[in-house]
Image (cartoon, grey):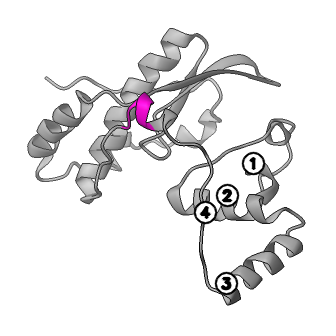
Amino acid sequence: MTKKPTFNLCKVDSSMFNSKMDIDEFVTEPENSKEIEKQVEQYAQLEYPIKLQKESDEHGMYWVAEHQDLPGCMTHGNTKEEALINLDDAKRSWIYTAVSLGTSIPDPGTKAEIEDCSGRILLRLPKELHYRLLQKSKEDNISLNQELLFLISSALGIRYLSSKKKQGRPCDRRDYK
């Protein structure tokens, strides 16, 4: 018996769901779904580090939970507990999608491994590339460090947003610090 998924629709414009068709008519299940479910269960047992933080905006206060090792695997809730429950569901969905698409699933990092990182690296690159990066950072009116962080983060699917994003300004390179 498969558990029917539930969704938090309190902040979603539900008018888009006024179709007379059932949502199941738009979703196809992979032929090897049983095999995928077994792999999901194996990966779901792995303990990925969790980043949990309190946020507030014009909608009020809420908690954001994220598995940083699984790019884009994040969710929120009104309480810490709700955010963590939602994160477990998001983790399973993330893994299911990755397995279905044949995408590799990263091993969980440990807190010790993360703490061992200083946040500083020495990077050697060709002079032409260095020059082009400097020109791009000047064009974007940000430091070379911010430009590199933006480009690397974008390539990894990671987003570091400053408080300016919370103020309603569109996200851009300045938001990567």
In magenta segment, residue 2: no
Q: CA distance from mark 4 to mark 1?
A: 18 Å
* Residue bearing mark 2: 149
First in sequence: mark 4 or mark 2? Answer: 4
Q: Is residue 135 left or right of residue 91?
A: right
Where is residue 170? Give x, y as percent: 81, 51
Q: Which residues are magenta?
A: 109-113
Labels 4 & 1 near each other (Cβ < 8 A): no
Query: Residue 4 falls in which quadrant of the image?
Result: top left
Query: Which is more N-terminal, label 1 or label 4?
Result: 4
Observer-nearest of 52 and 40: 52
Q: Residue 41 vs residue 85: left or right?
A: left
Mark closer to the chain start, 2 or 1: 2
Rendered location of residue 1, percent (x, y): 13, 23
Check disc 4 and report the residue beneath it.
122
Q: Secondary structure at mark 1?
A: loop
Of tags 3 and 1, the one toward the viewer is: 3
Determine crowd level at label 2: few under 14, some 14-19, many 20+ residues with C-alpha closer than 10 A: some
Q: Label 3 vs label 1: CA separation?
A: 21 Å
Query: Tag 1: Cα neighbours inside 10 Å, few (<14), some, or many (≥20)?
Result: some
Q: Position of residue 38 (x, y in %)?
A: 12, 37
Identity of the amino acid at label 2?
Leu
Q: Residue 177 has which mark? A: 1
Instruction: Return the residue at label 3.
Output: 129
Q: Residue at x 26, y 30 (%)?
A: 46
Q: How many discs appear?
A: 4
- How far, Cα to Cα, is label 4 from label 3? 15 Å
Task: Mark 3 or mark 1: name the one nearer the start of the chain.
Answer: 3
> 96 or 109, which is in the foreground?
109
Main SS, magenta region, reads helix
Whether residue 144 appears in this view of the structure is: yes
Say above or below: 155 vs 166: below
